[in-house]
Image (tube, rainbow, N blue to C red):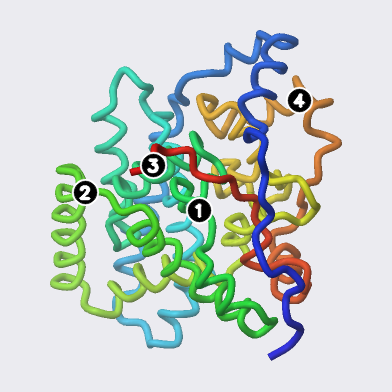
Amino acid sequence: MGAHVSRTDFEWSYTEEPHASRRKIILEKYPQIKKLFGYDPWFKWQVTGYVLMQFIMLFVMKDRSWPMIFLVAYCFGGVINHALMLAIHEISHNLAFGHARPMANRWLGFFANLPIGIPISISFRKWHLEHHRYQGDEVLDTDIPTYVEAKLFCTTAGKFLWVVLQPFFYALRPMFVYPKTPETLEVVNLLIQLTFDSLVYYFFGGKVLVYLIAGSLMAMGLHPVAGHFISEHYMFKKGFETYSYYGILNMVTFNVGYHNEHHDFPAVPGSRLPEVKRIAAEFYDNLPQHHSWVSVLYDFVTDPEIGPYARIRRKHRGLKS
């Protein structure tokens, strides 16, 4: 089973999350960063390009063998679908059309969701925004693994399995930790997605639908682009709870690697986050950072000091019943 993790609990913090205070300090020194706030007018065309790539792949993959279906899904389709998931992340912050046009953002989210095969656009948004507001909260931040996960997957082999199954934990954990009533737009998202999936199955067959969905799931698990799930907030250095990644894969993930910058300034679109880092370099250059998501995955699995417990948590401040 390999080495057992050395931690037996999460790292508990009794201070506020660091981003709000750093945002205030940075803006006092560099008020010009406010000019970077807003939406990226090119973003919707990037999303459209990714979706059209996958539409073309419906024809390309129609008569392929099963091994080819999974190989291409892992090496290509999954990368595109993961990029679309991160486009949905951008859209959740209204960075496609701005806060003044919320429904335009939601409809682009439905469109970006199509090749992914599983309806996630609206559900992701309602829990992700809580992650920003209440980072580390033991109840409200559903990005943090549960005690069950941390106790079950506490060896090298266990962590490897946890990484492979990460899409299922990531999707199902919020429903158990912090359940919310389904929204009307979630039903709309579901109906649009089921309609699209049914059309794909009818016109292109089951293999093509498997190509889409399997690519999404594989690219959220043991896959280089999925390294960001772990690199963002797992405590690789004691006391630091958010980490940026400055590697090449930012080019296909809307700069999600600039994660300290994103949490400091969630109103800045991904395309402008490198400019935030350039302007306020002294605030970011000396923070612990990653340069390889593959190394992140390897270290997470093999290093006994890192595992599902390696997260900073805070006590929930909600009113007691």
The amino acid type found where label 3 is placed reads: Lys
In the picture provided, is 97 more to the left or to the right than 158?
left
Q: For the residue labelled by badge 4, is the local secondary structure a helix, a strand or a loop?
A: helix
Q: Is residue 211 above or below residue 32?
A: below
Judge the density around disc 4: few (<14), some (14-19), many (≥20) Cα neighbours within 10 Å. Answer: few
Q: Nearer the viewer, mark 1 or mark 4?
A: 1
Alpha carbon of mark 2 to alpha carbon of mark 1: how far?
19 Å
Look at mark 2 in the image and give the residue it sits on.
181
In percent of width and height, residue 270 lies at 56, 34
Mark identifier at residue 278: 4
Look at mark 3 in the image and give the residue it sits on.
320
Q: Nearer the viewer, mark 3 or mark 2?
A: 3
The amino acid type found where label 2 is placed reads: Thr
The first of marks 1 and 4 along the sequence is: 1
Q: Nearer the viewer, residue 162 or 69?
A: 162
Q: For the residue labelled by badge 2, is the local secondary structure a helix, a strand or a loop?
A: loop
Alpha carbon of mark 1 to alpha carbon of mark 4: how far?
28 Å
Alpha carbon of mark 4 to alpha carbon of mark 3: how far?
44 Å
In percent of width and height, residue 161 lies at 56, 80
